[in-house]
Amino acid sequence: MRTKFSCVCALLACVLLNSIAFADEKAGVRSEITTVFGYYGVTHGLSDRRFATAWGNAYLSSGLGAHAEVHFMDREETASYFAGGLSWSGTSTSLRGWLGTSTGNDDILPELYARIEGIWRSSAETGFVVSPAATYRKFRNGAEEAIVEADIAKYYPLTTGYLILNTFGRVLFIDPGDHVTASFGAGVTYAQSRKVAIGVTVEAGRATYDGMLVPSTFDEPYVSLRPHVSFYITDKAEVVGLLEYSSRQSYDLYGGYVGLKLYFD
């Protein structure tokens, strides 16, 4: 089943990429493809995590967009995931919706994934970008999550690029247990358009949920540190990378990913 699903995902990705390339030639569509490979080590006897993800985005001159994501995860269970989405972009606002599912697994990738996200951009002189989003995830073990979040970024022009400061907050509603938990974070990034970007994000909050195998409730604070970097190796190719260290009472997590982003315009 997993092999069949992975083949279907690969086929859909190929169809998307071929459609993007065809539209590029016929209508001047702007498009991009990103592929990353990652690894996370986990302490206290939990399984390490290996994954690969590919995203494809195509933006039409009319403002409409098409999006696809294929994800493979190997940890306590092994599963694949596919999501597709549509978007609309205007002069100062954008709206995007996603819908996805996965192969058979209990609790590492959702059986049903739905997300809607928006972006509001102020004038270039003001330099604000506000990004609210809402996400729903349902797993095969019966767990459900609803997430409401928002990110606010401020761009400061510099002589050689931009300094970007951002802050974000997230509220999670988790069942079973009717838990409500929150997290907050902030980041700073230095970027030169079409050249390089380097920054770091810090996030802290609480993880509260009912154990599915052991009848107990977990409620513990956590903190995560994520430095990231990207740089262009050609006008159409960008290397992206992220490192992460996250600590909580029940385990520590460390690792990251590296990948390549290709632009077609």
Image: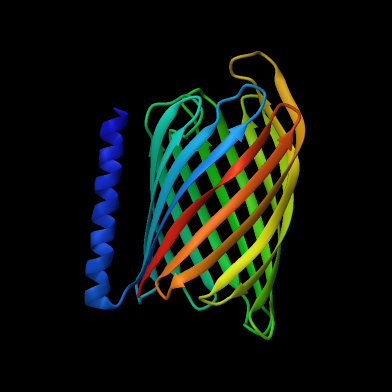
Name above or below for residue 239 compared with residue 10: below
Rendered location of residue 16, percent (x, y): 28, 57
User: Residue placed at 62% from the left, 83% from the top?
Assistant: 124
Rendered location of residue 224, percent (x, y): 71, 45
Q: Nearer the viewer, residue 196 or 216?
A: 196
Taking the image as shown, residue 43 lies to the left or right of residue 136, namely right
Q: Quadrant of residue 208?
A: top right
Looking at the image, the residue that sits furthest to the front is: 233
User: Residue placed at 63% from the left, 65% from the top?
Assistant: 198
User: Residue placed at 26% from the left, 77% from the top?
Assistant: 27
Q: How many marks?
A: 0
**Quadrant in which the C terminus appears:** bottom left
Taking the image as shown, residue 15 lies to the left or right of residue 263, namely left
Q: Quadrant of residue 111?
A: top left
**Quadrant in which the N terminus appears:** top left
Rendered location of residue 200, percent (x, y): 69, 58
Q: Quadrant of residue 250?
A: top right
User: Residue placed at 55% from the left, 30% from the top?
Assistant: 48
Taking the image as shown, residue 247 lies to the left or right of residue 30, namely right
Name above or below for residue 214 compared with residue 104: above
Rendered location of residue 79, percent (x, y): 41, 32
